[in-house]
Amino acid sequence: MNLSSLAVIAGIVVLMCLGSYACYLAYKLRQKKLKAEQAEQQLADELSKKEAEARQSVQIIARALVQKDLTETEAAMRIAWLSQQINLSVDEAQQVSVFHQLAGATAHIPILDDWASLSKSEKRRLNTERESIESNYREFIQVSAVDLTNIHLH
């Protein structure tokens, strides 16, 4: 065998090794891409599930409000928060906007532990203030609540 034949054979071996390595890297890249696509799909599925749960919760809260089981303010705070987890249609956004407005108008009123720590006279004053604010929104809130009971559940 002459030197040029050895060089050709060595070149072929090097090319085969590089080709094999390139195939290995392509395989690894494809595996990584598939894994990323699966993770993306899983995230999309989870977000869709969370959105469906939020929509169902909005519907339940709207029903409770229509049945007078909740105050307008409590429903507004809950619906305003839940609506942030939903990709709202234009119509749904209009229905929810009044809840955001009422939640904003009553945001200064303490809740939970902060409410419990207030004096009776302060609670009475804030209840009166809340009821006055609610009365300004009541008609719009009730109409929107009825519409939200029919919210499309995915």
Image (tube, rainbow, N blue to C red):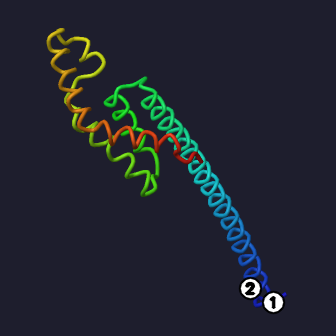
Relative horizontal placement of residue 77, taking residue 34 as reference (left or right): left
Image x and y of residue 113, in percent: 28, 15
Mark 2 or mark 1: which is in front? 2
* Residue at x-position 44% and y-position 51%: 92
- The residue that disc 1 covers is 2
Image x and y of residue 144, in percent: 40, 43
* Residue at x-position 18% and y-position 15%: 124
Crowding near the residue tagged with mark 1, few <14, some 14–19, many ≥20 C-alpha atoms within 10 Å:
few
Outermost residue to the top: 120
Crowding near the residue tagged with mark 2, few <14, some 14–19, many ≥20 C-alpha atoms within 10 Å:
few
Q: Amino acid at mark 1?
A: Asn
- The residue that disc 2 covers is 7
Residue 127 vs 143, above or below: the answer is: above
State the image quarter where residue 9 is shown.
Answer: bottom right
Image x and y of residue 51, in percent: 52, 44
Q: Amino acid at mark 2?
A: Ala
First of labels 2, 1 by sequence position: 1
Residue 138 vs 120, above or below: the answer is: below
Image x and y of residue 139, in percent: 32, 39
* Helix, strand or loop under label 1: loop
* Helix, strand or loop under label 2: helix
Dividing the image into 4 quarters, which one contains the N terminus? bottom right
